[in-house]
Image (tube, rainbow, N blue to C red):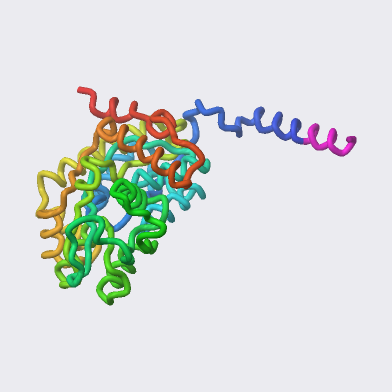
């Protein structure tokens, strides 16, 4: 008992010192200095707005007035490792699918979705010799998609279940990144893939598969990628977060108005064949958007699906996932 009491006294003493020197986070301070920003993103056309802002130099220009002198970014194959990196404190801002955000929030991630990035935009692609007429045709097939907890995994499993297909026993779902999945279907190691663009366009261009179902046919206007900001930035640098949202809006609007240039920038940064990118832009069912209010219902629905799948303990609420205030401020006249 004595040692326990001494331990508590020591903790209290440390806390008192921290409070005295202002080292604790009360959740309201805006005095914390920050001179760099770290971004996370994926090499998908879904997130081309991030690449536009980077190539144009807008991130640096727009954030310099807030003291940002250095920017770094980290490229991830899927949202699962990206959110693990954010949980570890290595990323301040992430372009990522909404479903991995849910999984991360459920395990303690201190962050919020502050803007939408796009909706729909993934395809179920099957090998040329596979005849697809209905979900029933997928029984017994090997399907590669992103790891558990991602948009593609969550959406695919929910769609299969809604069509009477057990995703655990009727099909063999293999977790893979886009590169591995593209190789796997080209080599015949899997029968189908469910991937975001431009991977479906790449597979089609190489003659290794055709689109059987677009993700918007699985769930119309479903949320996909979102803009996520750390709780530290939200609490301590709210003006900077508002500017991040403004820059994202500017880049998204530029992408929509200048798709040829956006395709070229995507090509330059990711070395995907220009014809493939142009085909992806022309034929995907995705839409680039920014208003998070458009996707709140869809994202909250994902939490119910993930809870049913056993990925999270309970569904999350809109307030636990979103902070809509920054978008509202960023778009005020």
Up-down relation of residue 6 to residue 254 (above or below) = above
Q: Position of residue 332 (x, y in %)?
A: 23, 23
In this view of the protein, can residue 195 be seen by the observer? Answer: yes
Residue at x-position 34% and y-position 49%: 161
Q: Position of residue 84 (x, y in %)?
A: 47, 52
Residue at x-position 47% and y-position 47%: 311
Q: Is residue 232 left or right of residue 68?
A: right
Residue at x-position 14% and y-position 64%: 276
Which of the pair 145/6 is nearer the observer? 145
Q: Position of residue 16 (x, y in %)?
A: 71, 29
Q: Is residue 22 left or right of residue 144?
A: right
| Residue 243 figure quarter | top left
Residue at x-position 42% and y-position 30%: 317
Which of the pair 245/195 is nearer the observer? 195
In this view of the protein, can residue 269 be seen by the observer? Answer: no
| Residue 28 covered by magenta stretch | no
Up-down relation of residue 206 to residue 251 (above or below) = below
Q: Is residue 22 left or right of residue 157?
A: right
Magenta region, residue range: 1-10
Which of the pair 13/285 is nearer the observer? 285
Magenta span dominant secondary structure: helix
| Quadrant for the C terminus in the image | top left
Which of the pair 83/57 is nearer the observer? 83
Residue occupying the far right of the picture: 2
| Residue 330 figure quarter | top left
Q: Position of residue 43 (x, y in %)?
A: 29, 58
């Amino acid at each position: 008992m004595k040692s326990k009491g001494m331990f508590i006294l020591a903790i209290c003493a440390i806390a008192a010192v921290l409070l005295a020197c202002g080292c604790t986070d009360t959740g309201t301070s805006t005095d914390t200095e920050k001179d760099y920003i770290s971004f996370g993103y994926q090499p998908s056309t879904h997130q081309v707005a991030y690449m536009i802002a980077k190539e144009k130099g807008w991130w640096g220009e727009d954030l310099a007035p807030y003291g940002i002198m250095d920017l770094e970014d980290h490229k991830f194959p899927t949202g699962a490792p990206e959110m693990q990196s954010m949980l570890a404190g290595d990323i301040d801002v992430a372009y990522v699918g909404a479903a991995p955000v849910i999984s991360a929030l459920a395990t303690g991630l201190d962050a919020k979705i502050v803007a939408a990035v796009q909706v729909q935009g993934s395809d179920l692609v099957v090998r040329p010799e596979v005849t697809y007429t209905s979900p029933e045709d997928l029984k017994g097939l090997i399907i590669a998609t992103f790891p558990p907890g991602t948009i593609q995994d969550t959406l695919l499993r929910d769609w299969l279940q809604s069509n009477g297909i057990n995703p655990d026993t009727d099909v063999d779902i293999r977790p893979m990144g886009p590169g591995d999945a593209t190789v796997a279907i080209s080599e015949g190691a899997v029968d189908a893939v469910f991937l975001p663009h431009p991977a479906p366009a790449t597979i089609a261009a190489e003659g290794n598969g055709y689109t059987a179902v677009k993700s918007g046919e699985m769930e119309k206007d479903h949320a996909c990628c979102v803009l996520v900001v750390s709780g530290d930035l939200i609490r301590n640098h709210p003006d900077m977060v508002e500017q991040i949202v403004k820059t994202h809006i500017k880049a998204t609007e530029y992408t929509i108005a200048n798709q040829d240039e956006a395709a070229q920038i995507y090509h330059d940064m990711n070395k995907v064949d220009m014809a493939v990118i142009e085909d992806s832009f022309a034929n995907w069912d995705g839409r680039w958007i920014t208003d998070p209010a458009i996707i709140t219902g869809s994202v909250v629905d994902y939490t119910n699906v993930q809870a049913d799948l056993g990925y999270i303990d309970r569904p999350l609420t809109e307030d636990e996932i979103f902070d809509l205030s920054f978008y509202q401020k960023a778009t005020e006249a």
